[in-house]
Image: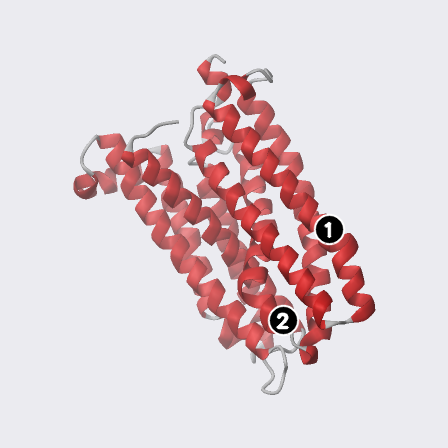
Amino acid sequence: MSSDPVWLLQVAFAALADLAFACTLGALLLDAWLRGEQAFAPKSPARGSARRAARTALAAALTFVVCDFVSLWLQSAAMSGSPILDAGATLWLVATATHAGLGASVAFAGGVLLTIAAATSSQMRNAHHAHNAHNALAVLGALIAACGKAAIGHAADAGAFSVAEGVQTLHLLATAVWGGVVIAGAAAVLPALASSVARDALMRVVARLSRVATIAVAFVIATGVFNAWRGTGGSPAVITQSGWGHALAVKAALVAAALALGALNRWSALPRLQRTASTMDAHTVINVMRVEAAVMAGVFVAASVLSHSVPGFATGG
């Protein structure tokens, strides 16, 4: 941990980038599901929700691209030791000649593809033959962005194209899908489906969201355990004896809290909504998801602190 202003800015913008990446994936998934609900039809009660999904995806993708560029700029300042405003002089060198810079550049390219996918989402609504190409572009952008982000963190210590980087890429994607559908759904998309005329669409979308989140969680836990074991060097003592370990403990606690809230929705609130289709139960599902979204935002902040801290095994406990 550090109180250096550049370090603090790096953590802040990395956390915002992670959050934006997640919201982009979540909103794009919600947009695809709403297309299946024919939400783009002029008289569809879910039309407003579909518009929110598309706008959220585009805003989040643009935010991710901007944050990634700012993070690269801050990395240049940290590596060159120059003032932040003068870091542009070394920006190209860092972006092309360092592993972290190349990773950020790759993530930036992935973000651009995601932005294009989000920007063209509305045009895809009435062009069904183009849906597969559009979805492929979004998937490609997500994979490239996640690979670039994985190359910036501690997984890069194992070398390019290593197992550690592969696991971290999967971890980033799974966390982004889980957090993204929850945050984008609770903050922007699902409230527009809370009316009685859109209740059936709400129940179907939330059920699908819950299933996808459950699958993503399984990958988050499996890859997270691997990353934690690698970070501790096999010595659990570093969790209590290092700043990195403390951040890991906070992240684990937040993940556990998010899991509990997700389970509450999946096994209690959602089944009750499916039985009653009442406005009260619809609001309960969305409100529980809002709390889960706030907790997931904390997970992304903790993850950013972890990625910018010295791993526990390297501190010597």
Residue linked to disc 2: 34
Whether residue 34 is situated above or below residue 64 in the rendered picture: below
Q: Position of residue 218 (x, y in %)?
A: 69, 42
Q: Residue furthest right?
A: 275
Residue appearing at x 70%, y 67% in the figure: 282
Q: Residues within 10 Å of mark 2 (few under 14, many from 20)?
A: many
Amino acid type shown at disc 2:
Leu
Amino acid type shown at disc 1:
Leu
Residue appearing at x 57%, y 15% in the figure: 237
Q: Residue furthest top?
A: 316
Q: Position of residue 239 (x, y in %)?
A: 55, 21
Is residue 225 shown left or right of residue 89?
Answer: right
Q: Are marks 2 and 1 in contact (CB under 8 Å)?
A: no
Gap between marks 2 and 1 measured at Cα: 24 Å
Residue appearing at x 36%, y 50% in the figure: 67
Res. 265 image quadrant: bottom right
Whether residue 68 is situated above or below residue 25 in the rendered picture: above
Dot 2 or dot 1, earlier in sequence: 2
Q: Residue furthest bottom?
A: 43
Front position in the image: 266 or 156? 266
Query: Does residue 31 appear in this view?
Result: no
Residue appearing at x 52%, y 24% in the figure: 245
Whether residue 47 is situated above or below residue 100 in the rendered picture: below
Residue 183, which numbered label? Answer: none
Tag 1, which secondary structure? helix
Residue linked to disc 1: 264
Q: Residue furthest front?
A: 280
Is residue 99 shown left or right of residue 296?
Answer: left
Q: Position of residue 219 (x, y in %)?
A: 66, 41
Q: Residues within 10 Å of mark 1 (few under 14, many from 20)?
A: some
Which part of the image, by quadrant, shows the N terminus?
top left
Is residue 12 shown left or right of residue 190?
Answer: left
